[in-house]
Image: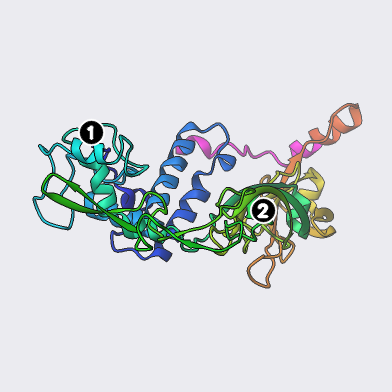
Amino acid sequence: MPERKDYYGTLGVAKKATDDEIRKAYRRLARKYHPDLNPGDKAAEDKFKTVQEAYDILNEPKKRQMFDQYGFYSDSGVPGGGAPPQGGPGMGFEGFDFSDFINQQGGRRPHPTAGADTGGRFTDIFSQFFGGREAAQQQQPEKGADLEYSLNIDFWQSIRGTQVRLSISRQDACTTCNGSGSAGGAVATCGDCNGSGQVSQTAGAMKFNLTCSRCNGSGRLRNVCPACRGEGCTARMDSVEVRLPAGVASGSRLRVAAKGNAGRMGGEAGDLYITVRVEDHAFFKRDGDTIEIKVPITVPEAVLGAKIEVPTIDGRAILKIPQGTQNGQKFRLREKGVASARKETRGDQIVEVFLQAPPANDERTRELLRELAEQYPPDPRSELWTKV
């Protein structure tokens, strides 16, 4: 019995969640636990794999239907000890010997996903008996998978915006067959099932309609493209040009439509999702759209007040230091921060000042400091003892 897992709980959605809700939950968690955004974090990497596994099941209607019905998903179908199929409650095949049926097949398995044993287990027949429609649907167009890409940019590229050209490996439509998976030529009716997609087989007194193994339930035979082996797509390197807007922040996720893997059997391509990671700057610190810096000031500037020049991301700016400024005091420069990538506004710049004591290397300086101490005799630490 496959391990039962709570894929809905993993994504944090209800069992009745829509496809869009599942997709949004997956993207949010994938962005949070992506290994590129959590380097060296094994727990985040394991969580990302768990989230990816849950999304792979719930994003596919057939897989989700099986998970909802039986509480688990298995590529080989429902095992012999699993829940009964919809065809009849309590219907089981344990105890039946299907060796006669296997012998009628010439010793070969009737379906590529059959089980390993030929005795009382019914996986082979069950998967074909209920899988005829699924096999036929495999020939229908299928959307390609989305791709994830991590992009590192420097601080100034994020502030001013930039345009980058990426080289990505993706599955693209086969140029030989134009994505059809067929080498062309006439499509013939399958002679084994006469175009019905199913064949009848008997095991003792029981008769089954099984998926035709020759045409996989499609009822037609085609010439498979030798370049892509019938998949309709091949791997190749592709160049993608991406424009990053001014103000893009670390962790931002950009979508490039139709630049994921090509679809199968002529289906539309998936999308490319780019997660941006911005390198830190040695001086400017960014918090959202706010820029923070620390600037030293002298004791006379703090006591008497002054106008000083401070760096901003736009160049130099004048900051007024009022009289009696204290160490660690913060000042705000309006609209000197980062331009918002989502709205037409700019953040602010916060300037934190710290006092820089003058070097007392000569007697004249020491004399002035002694005079200052005499002019200001109160002990600034006297109030500390009342709070201890």
Q: Which residue is mark 2?
A: 330
Q: Secondary structure at mark 1?
A: loop
* Of 117 and 258, the residue lying toward us: 117
* Of 388 and 193, the residue lying toward us: 193
> Which quadrant of the structure image shows residue 79?
top left
Query: Measured from the top left, where is residue 220 in percent x and y?
Result: 45, 60
Query: Could you tell me if the residues under marks 2 and 1 are in contact, i.e. CB atoms within 8 Å?
Result: no
| Residue ID at (80%, 44%) | 298
Q: Is residue 1 above or below residue 246?
A: above
Q: Is residue 362 visible?
A: yes
Q: Amino acid at mark 2?
A: Lys
> Which quadrant of the structure image shows residue 186?
bottom right
Q: Which residue is mark 1?
A: 118
Q: Is residue 149 above or below residue 195?
A: above
Query: Measured from the top left, where is residue 103 in percent x and y?
Result: 25, 36
Mark 2 Cα shell of 10 Å, populated few (<14), some (14-19), many (≥20) = some
Write the start and end of the magenta stretch as one range.
371-388
Q: Quadrant of the N terminus?
A: top left
